[in-house]
Image (spheres, rainbow, N blue to C red):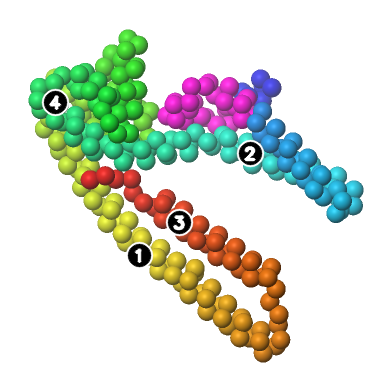
């Protein structure tokens, strides 16, 4: 098992950084071991389900050939899913930070302009409201362990998934290293971030128009006209539609509706102006 863990860690060279960015407090070896164990459990469960579900419907030789295929396929799929789960957490953290980073930056700018030191500003930001306070709290927690402010900010900048948050942390780092006034550069950075968010909203509007047009054609016009034409043609050739066919069409339309809702939610920029 130890050899397998080392091999898989080498096959995923960016796993250590991904775990750090996702704030998963596990070593790559422990994470691979856990993913391997959970994949085995899931593949055994799916293999047993496939065996008992097909034992009465298929000849035994076909069942014996099917179950290993289900076991291997399910193991690979579940294992790949678990190995890529940190990327999903990283994307969620990025969206959370991007949603609140502008307000957090403006709050810090207000504190700095009032004469508050950077350390006190970070502490106050970690106690504030909003999602970004959690990520400032992580920086403050590192500082409380004895790490210097520069190292804590550099670590946060290296392992954050938000490019916008990196820009704000970079301005704080430059100030600490050079001793210059941070308010001017930070104000310019926040203005640039606000302009970027306006551009993202405009691009989302254009993308939403295209999605709505495609939605109207695929989920509204095509099913209604297609079903009407199918009923008309069926009446000429005495084709009877059973309830199962109608329920199948209804299920297909529900899947399309859910698909478009997911697409629209995924395309929405996480901005707050």
Q: Residue at x 90, y 48 (%)?
A: 60
Q: Residue at x 23, y 45 (%)?
A: 273
Instruction: Evaluate whether residue 73 shows in this view.
Output: yes
Q: Nearer the viewer, residue 191 or 107?
A: 107
- Compared to 149, does 200 lie above or below? below
Q: Which residue is mark 1?
A: 209
Tag 3 near tag 4, CB within 8 Å: no
Q: Earlier in the sequence, mark 1 or mark 4?
A: 4
Q: Mark 4 or mark 3, which is nearer the start of the sequence? A: 4
Q: Secondary structure at mark 3?
A: helix
Report which residue position mark 2 lands on.
78
Spot occupied by residue 241 in the image (x, y as percentages of width and height): 68, 76
Residue drawn at x 20%, y 23% is: 121
The magenta segment is 7-36
Residue tagged 3: 261
Depth check, front residue: 164 or 45: 45
Nearest to viewer (mark 3 / mark 4): 3
* Residue at x 85% of width, y 54% of height: 57
Residue 90: % across, % down: 43, 35
* Secondary element at tag 1: helix
Give the image quarter of residue 148. top left
Q: Quadrant of residue 193?
A: top left
Mark 1 near mark 4, Cβ–Cβ under 8 Å?
Answer: no
Q: Mark 2 or mark 1, which has the lower sequence index?
A: 2
């Amino acid at each position: 098992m130890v050899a397998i863990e080392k091999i898989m860690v080498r096959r995923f060279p960016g796993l250590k950084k991904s775990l750090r960015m996702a704030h998963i407090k596990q070593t790559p070896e422990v994470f691979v071991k856990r993913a391997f164990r959970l994949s085995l459990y899931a593949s055994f469960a799916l293999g047993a389900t496939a065996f008992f579900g097909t034992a009465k419907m298929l000849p035994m030789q076909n069942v014996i050939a099917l179950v290993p295929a289900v076991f291997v396929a399910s193991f690979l799929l579940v294992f790949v899913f678990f190995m890529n789960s940190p990327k999903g957490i990283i994307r969620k953290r990025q969206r959370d930070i991007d949603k609140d980073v502008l307000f957090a930056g403006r709050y810090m700018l207000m504190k700095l302009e009032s004469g508050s030191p950077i350390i006190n500003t970070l502490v106050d930001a970690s106690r504030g409201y909003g999602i970004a306070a959690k990520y400032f709290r992580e920086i403050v927690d590192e500082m409380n362990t004895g790490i210097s402010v520069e190292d804590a900010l550099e670590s946060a900048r290296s392992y954050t998934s938000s490019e916008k948050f990196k820009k704000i942390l970079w301005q704080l780092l430059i100030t600490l290293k050079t001793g210059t006034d941070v308010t001017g550069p930070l104000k310019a950075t926040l203005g640039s971030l606000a302009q970027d968010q306006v551009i993202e909203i405009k691009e989302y509007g254009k993308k939403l128009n295209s999605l709505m047009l495609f939605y109207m054609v695929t989920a509204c016009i095509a099913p209604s006209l297609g079903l009407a034409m199918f009923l008309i043609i069926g009446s000429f050739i005495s084709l009877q539609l059973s309830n199962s066919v109608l329920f199948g069409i209804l299920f297909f339309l529900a899947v399309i509706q859910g698909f478009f809702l997911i697409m629209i939610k995924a395309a929405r920029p996480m901005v707050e102006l």
